[in-house]
Amino acid sequence: MYLITAYFDDRTNKNISRWIDGIAKCTGNQFMLEHNVPPHLTITAFDSRGADHIIPIMDRLQTKLNSIDVEFVSTGVFLPYVMYITPVLDKQLHEMASIIHDDVISAPESAVNGLHISKFYHPDKWFPHTTIGKTLDEEQLRQAFAYMQKSFVPFSGKIVELGLARTNPHEDIVRCEI
């Protein structure tokens, strides 16, 4: 599985990292820290026989896209074991996701490499989120939720980079400023 992810400015990273660290501390679940999962927003996830053909697409996206502001307004869970924060899916964020999706899916090399985008990462079905806790059991999820109830406040952030990464473990293949 490969991802195209959005990365944030330093201030946003510090905010999100504080919650990742806080959840790890209050639950004892170190998954996010042990796997060095950086604060990010996955724009698309896909299977493919390789990702080398996506690198030129990333170069083109770098010239097409600009940094954008995002408003993180809520926290939530994907049952049974993921806690996240979520930004508003406004026009700018939707346009960014649509451009990335269209460029990836329309590249002739994508068909040759058997590229298949996850059904959860099509622009009209996408639920943007930034994971702050993963592999949480039922009790840890309750603890994480209690922690976030006390500490989360909506905030503004900024997307400043895009990355192409492998999953499990998270490993950047290429990153580029936008």
Image: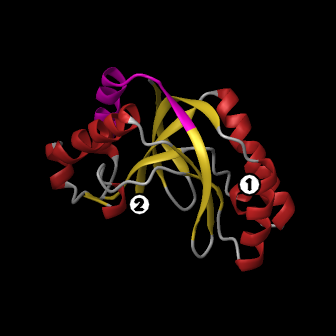
Instruction: Locate residue 125: give its quadrant.
Output: bottom left
Question: Which residue type does callout 2 highlight?
Answer: Met
Question: Is residue 77 left or right of 61 when viewed as pictured?
Answer: right
**Disc 2 from disc 1: Cα separation:** 21 Å
Where residue 45 appears, x then y in whole percent? Answer: 38, 55
Where residue 76 appears, x then y in whole percent? Answer: 60, 60
Instruction: Locate residue 108: give its quadrant.
Output: top left
Asked whether residue 30 appears in the rendered view, the answer is no
- Residue 67 is one of the magenta-drawn residues: yes
Mark with earlier residue (2, 1): 2
Asked whether residue 139 appears in the rendered view, the answer is yes
Where residue 166 appears, x then y in whole percent? Answer: 47, 53
Foreground of the two, 77 or 130: 77
Above or below for 119 versus 151: below
Report the span colored magenta.
55-71
Which structural element holds mark 1? helix
Q: Which residue is mark 2?
A: 1
Q: Residues within 10 Å of mark 2 (few under 14, many from 20)?
A: some
Q: Tell me the number on the disc at residue 33.
A: 1
- Residue 46 is one of the magenta-drawn residues: no
Which structural element holds mark 2? loop
Q: Residues within 10 Å of mark 1 (few under 14, many from 20)?
A: some
Foreground of the two, 68 or 30: 68
